[in-house]
Amino acid sequence: MFKGLLRSRRVKKVASAASLAAFLDRNASLVSQKTVIGYCLVKTSLPIHELIKEKAFADAYDAAIWEAYAATLADLVMVAEAHLRPVAGDHPEEVARGLVRLHGNILTGHPAPANRPHGWAADTEALRVRLQEHQAAVPKSIREIAETAGERAFDALPIHERLRRPDKPAAVAGVQFLMVGLAHEFEQQIDCPAVVADLRALGAVEPA
């Protein structure tokens, strides 16, 4: 079963790449689990511990949690880039490289789930491309960014597509609501100059 939330503690101050990683990991865990568990509870009126007694559902549930987690993590990295950009000055590309490296490190820090036996390299590469496009324009709002995670999380939900299809707008909006709710934490907890300096240093390191 998914263990991300259980291993993640609340980060009170984000002043380094490592603490930003913990902050993003924890909040991606929270959003993904609230999204998947909440939807299944509303749709079936059964608690998760009853639903996962059936192996087929348990496997689909684990896959949904991981896909929602990975999608939310990528979008939170995008939000972080937008939040840090005013402090990045003439070095946005270096910050982006650091964020991409951080994203890959967070994902490889978890055991590869059954639905992703070959890991998350494709997700990290997709994020690199998204960040390039994102930096070429005015930063999007959290709500706009979170639409991507909302749609990907919805597509992964462990309920038959025919039954969940009418729920897509509400489900996507739910993810957006949860992520917009993190705006205050970004404002209050992240020491932007310190994090930017650390990300630039991380981005400058050549891959092993």
Image (spheres, rainbow, N blue to C red):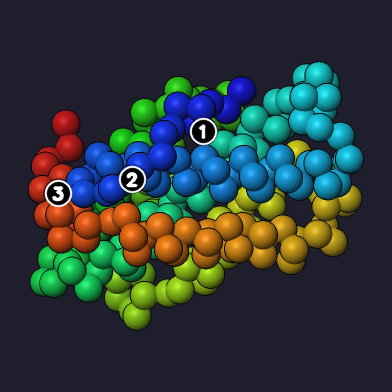
Circle 3 is placed at which residue position? 198
Q: Position of residue 155 (x, y in %)?
A: 69, 50
Tell us which disc is closer to us: 2 or 1.
2
Residue 143 in the figure: left or right of residue 44: left
Label 3: element kind: helix
Q: Amino acid at mark 1?
A: Leu
Q: Amino acid at mark 3?
A: Asp
Tell us which disc is closer to us: 2 or 3.
2
Return the disc, 1 or 3, that comes first in the chain's sequence: 1
Q: Position of residue 24 (x, y in %)?
A: 39, 46
Residue 163 numbered mark, or none: none
Q: Is residue 163 above or below residue 139?
A: above
- Quadrant for the C terminus, please: top left
Label 2: element kind: loop
Residue 5 numbered mark, or none: 1
- Quadrant for the N terminus, please: top right
Q: Is residue 53 above or below residue 182?
A: above
Q: Are marks 2 and 1 in contact (CB under 8 Å)?
A: no
Residue 111 visible, this angle: yes
Residue sitting at the far bottom: 138
Q: Position of residue 60 (x, y in %)?
A: 72, 32
Q: Amino acid at mark 2?
A: Lys
Q: CA distance from mark 1 to mark 3?
A: 25 Å
